Amino acid sequence: MKISKNEVEKIAHLARLEIEDSRKEKMVEQLGNILQYIDKLKYADVDGVGFSSGAATTDNVLREDMPEASPGPSITLANAPDRDEDFYVVPRVVK
């Protein structure tokens, strides 16, 4: 599967990453190679192959839920792309 420079830029934007123009072509090549490898896995014959680890059959072990003090809006909203006082600002979805 091929990936374009434009798609790399969109992915970087969604991940909030800044990629220098000089590195974008390398990212196109690397992500393309990863996607080609994943595409090959679709054709792997796995008939009759059992689980290779017990992770798929074990129960989830949860820690005890302990209440903690909130770190406050200055920390929880530190990476928010847009905020209004103590609230996240998001694009309107419902009209």
Image: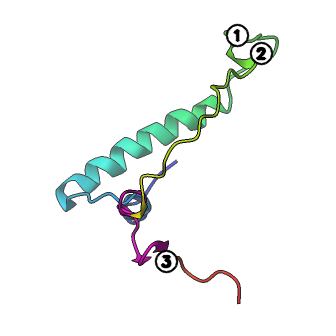
Rendered residue at 68%/29% (across/down): 43
- Whether residue 80 appears in magenta in the rendering, the answer is yes
Identify the magenta region. Answer: 74-89
- Work out whether 78 lies above or below 64: below
* Mark found first going from the N terminus, 1 or 3: 1
| Residue 36, image x, y percentages | 50, 39
In contact (CB < 8 Å): disc 3 and disc 2: no
Q: How is the image coloured?
A: rainbow
| Closer to the eye: label 3 or 2 | 3
Give SS at disc 1: helix
Question: Is residue 51 or residue 93 the one in the foreground?
Answer: 93
Kindly identify the amino acid type of the residue bearing the numbered disc 1. Gly
Q: Residue at x 70, y 84 (%)?
A: 94
Chain-order first, disc 3 or disc 2: 2
Report the mark closest to the observer, 1 or 3.
3
Q: Which residue is mark 2?
A: 57
The type of residue carrying mark 3 is Val
Q: How many marks?
A: 3
Callout 2 amino acid: Thr
Residue at 76% of width from left, 11% of height from top? 49
Structural crowding at the residue carrying mark 1, measured as other residues with C-alpha within 10 Å and reported as few (<14), some (14–19) or many (≥20):
few
Distance between the Cα atoms at labels 1 and 2? 5 Å
Q: Which residue is mark 1?
A: 54
Q: Which residue is mark 3?
A: 89
* Residue plotted at (59% across, 32% down): 40
Label 1 to label 3: alpha-carbon separation: 43 Å
The image quadrant where one finds the C terminus is bottom right
Q: Is 62 left, or right, of 21 in this rendering?
A: right
Q: Secondary structure at mark 2?
A: loop
Residue 70 position in % (x across, y down)? 48, 52
Front one among 55 and 73: 73
